[in-house]
Amino acid sequence: MFYLVNFEKKNSGDEILIASSIPKSSGLKAWGDAVLIASNSYFSYVNDNNLLKDKKIVFKTLDDKYEPDLTYENIQKLSKDNILALYGVVGTPTNKEILPLLEKNNLLYFSPFSGAEFLRNNTIPNIVNFRASYKEELENLLNYIIDEKNLKKIAIFYQNDEYGEEGLISTLKILKDKNIELSATGTYKRNSLSISHAFNEIKNSKPEAIVMIGAYKAISLFIEKAKKDKVLKDTIFCNISFGDANSIVKELESTNTNTKNLIFSQIVPNYNDKSLQIVQEYQSIMQKYAKDKPLGFISFEAFLASKVLVNQISKLEKIGELNQKNLLNTLKNPPKNLLYEIEMGFKNNQLLNKTYLFEYKNNNFEEIKR
């Protein structure tokens, strides 16, 4: 299906309205909080320092509880306003639900918080992704587990929706290319902690590694349960970025569950690596505008995406009218060094094209150098 886009909406007045639907409650609240706090921190910095020359960024958000029907309703409401861009809807099923609205309302959409392949489909021209895809994360993760750790008995624990299915399909394809079959699959319902059946299915296969495609509370509960089981206590648990590494570790530590044998894929470098100029900037701005709020990978990603969005809005004064068409074009061509050490290049309908692996050791995320 090809989406025809006719951008007519223009920005007017002193406010530039950016909108989103994110989980402010429910089991994915920590995810939504990280996006909201980091983005608002950067937007506040922009407004306080007049980086958009007497215009102010306004970030309007509604709670969708990580439920696609609510996301659809929220975007319907938000699209009635004079929005310059939709930004940062959290989740794969939620993003899948709003695709018809992007077409119907001609909405420019930047930086969905999802690595789904359908968001990277070139038949949807009004989407510009920021993050690398789940497929790229899983390729890097499984190449390490199989080729370097020499583990062959691999199971998958996944959320029973579009997000989990994306991970399952990518994992199956990667394993097929390596002539490996999954030892077991286990699934659970979104926004639930009903993992017992999945746990038993996976446990019975005695896997060496488990790929985990879920939300942090369900993943944490699974790992906590596995660490108490003789069969799974030494299994390696492999998480992709959407799992939310910071929240997983926090949940496990709150129950005194050991955090050994956890591998985390990420699409940004370590948010605590102060040798990086971009990390110094992130931490400085967060310290000023969200002093008591936790730093983390998701927060860092949201900060970076916000910085790209604002920088490209600022360029529009040089190329003409501030509207969605112009912003779409400029978002595809940000300066390569805008994020300093983090390179950007528009490829596969996304700006970031690198993934990272981390282990949690000595109360820190340590990058697995390869």
Image (cartoon, rainbow, N blue to C red):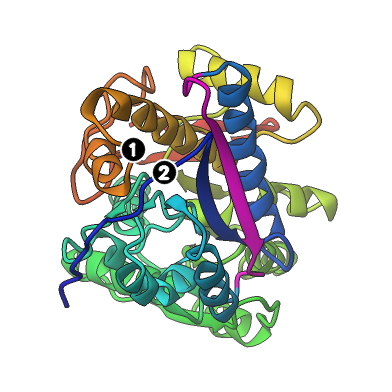
* Label 2 packing within 10 angstroms: few (<14), some (14-19), many (20+): some
Disc 1 element: loop
Q: Position of residue 339 (x, y in %)?
A: 39, 23
Identity of the residue drawn at 49% across and 51% down: 241
Q: Which residue is mark 2?
A: 11
Position of 369 with respect to 366 (left or right) is: left
Position of 263 with respect to 195 (left or right) is: left
Q: Position of residue 243 (x, y in %)?
A: 55, 57
Please determine whether, in this image, residue 286 is positioned above or below residue 64.
above
Position of 68 with respect to 351 (left or right) is: right
Query: Of residues 279 and 216, which is closer to you in this image?
Result: 279
Query: Of residues 339 and 79, which is closer to you in this image?
Result: 79
Disc 2 element: loop
Please determine whether, in this image, residue 340 is positioned above or below residue 26.
above
Q: Is residue 36 visible?
A: yes
Please determine whether, in this image, residue 369 is positioned above or below residue 126.
above
Q: Is residue 15 magenta?
A: no
| Corner quadrant of residue 282 | top right
Q: Are marks 1 and 2 in contact (CB under 8 Å)?
A: yes
Amino acid type, callout 1: Leu
Q: Is residue 233 visible?
A: no
Q: Which residue is mark 1?
A: 322
Q: Which residues are magenta?
A: 51-66
